[in-house]
Image: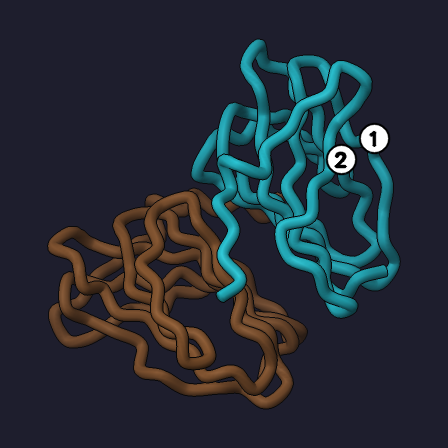
Chain colours: A brown, B cyan
């Protein structure tokens, strides 16, 4: 059975945000994003893909389609195809996100 | 911004497992499954879809492709296309799952 213990996958780097695959598929990404304080995923967009961020730990400043909002553990947000999106760990503690992107670009 | 506070979406019923949409799309399901003790999602399969279960709260007995395993909060499991899958809340406490299914059948 393809079981993943999420805590065991979490990795941080002083260099940059870590993106760690949870499950592999040609149809979607299911990843963990691990951001130390101050790290970010710069604003970008995917013309055809939805991206769902679910905050597992910490809090992050999300930018979606020109809006900004601080989200905490237990909150989720959707970036639709073509929408600018990014996230910054502007808090002191670590930030861990469960991220789904469909379809895989 | 399409933000969802997962705690506010959780609903249980004495009748059966509750399936609550988190985000709506024609391409995938992103749902919460809320199971009281003893409730289940019976074993079934989807010929073309992957289903990912992520345990948010409680623990559940998962059946995937003939194997059974008890998973707890912070664990995730994948059922691939054509694989039998189901879950039962065999514990005393409530079970809450974040579920992604791609593509939407």
Image quadrant holding the C terminus of chain B, namely bottom right
Mark 1 or mark 2: whose residue is earlier in sequence: 1
Q: Is residue A5 above or below residue B10?
A: below
Image spot of residue B64 (x, y percent): 72, 40
Lateral position of residue B9 relative to residue A87, left or right: right
Q: Camera-side residue: B79 or A82?
A: A82
Q: Give me the residue at 40% from left, 74% from top.
A: A67
Lateral position of residue A51 relative to residue B65, left or right: left
Q: Is residue A29 above or below residue A85?
A: above
Circles 1, 2 touching at the beta carbon (< 8 Å): yes
- Labelled disc at residue A30: none
Q: From mark 1 to mark 2, how far is it between C-alphas? A: 5 Å
In this rendering, the count of numbered labels is 2
Image spot of residue B55 (x, y percent): 53, 37
Image spot of residue B35 (x, y percent): 67, 25
Q: Camera-side residue: B99 or B70?
A: B99
Residue holding disc 1? B42
Q: Is residue B22 above or below residue A66?
A: above
Question: Residue at the bottom extreme?
Answer: A47
Residue A34: tell me if it is visible.
Answer: yes
Q: Give me the residue at 64% from left, 25% from top.
A: B61
Residue holding disc 2? B86
Instruction: Read off the chain for label 2.
Output: B
Figure quadrant of residue B25: bottom right
Give a yes or no on whether discs 1 and 2 share a subunit.
yes
Residue neighbourhood size for the residue with mark 2, other residues' Cα within 10 Å, grouped as few (<14), some (14–19), many (≥20): some
Residue neighbourhood size for the residue with mark 1, other residues' Cα within 10 Å, grouped as few (<14), some (14–19), many (≥20): few
């Amino acid at each position: 059975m393809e079981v993943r213990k999420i805590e065991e996958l979490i990795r941080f780097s002083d260099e940059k945000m870590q993106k760690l695959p949870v499950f592999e598929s040609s149809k979607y990404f299911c990843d963990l994003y691990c951001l130390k304080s101050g790290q970010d995923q710069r604003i970008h967009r995917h013309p055809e893909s939805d991206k769902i961020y679910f905050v597992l730990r910490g809090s992050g400043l999300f930018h979606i389609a020109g809006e900004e909002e601080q989200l905490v553990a237990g909150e989720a947000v959707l970036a639709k195809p073509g929408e600018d999106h990014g996230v910054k760990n502007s808090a002191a503690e670590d930030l861990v996100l469960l991220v789904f992107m469909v379809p895989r670009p």
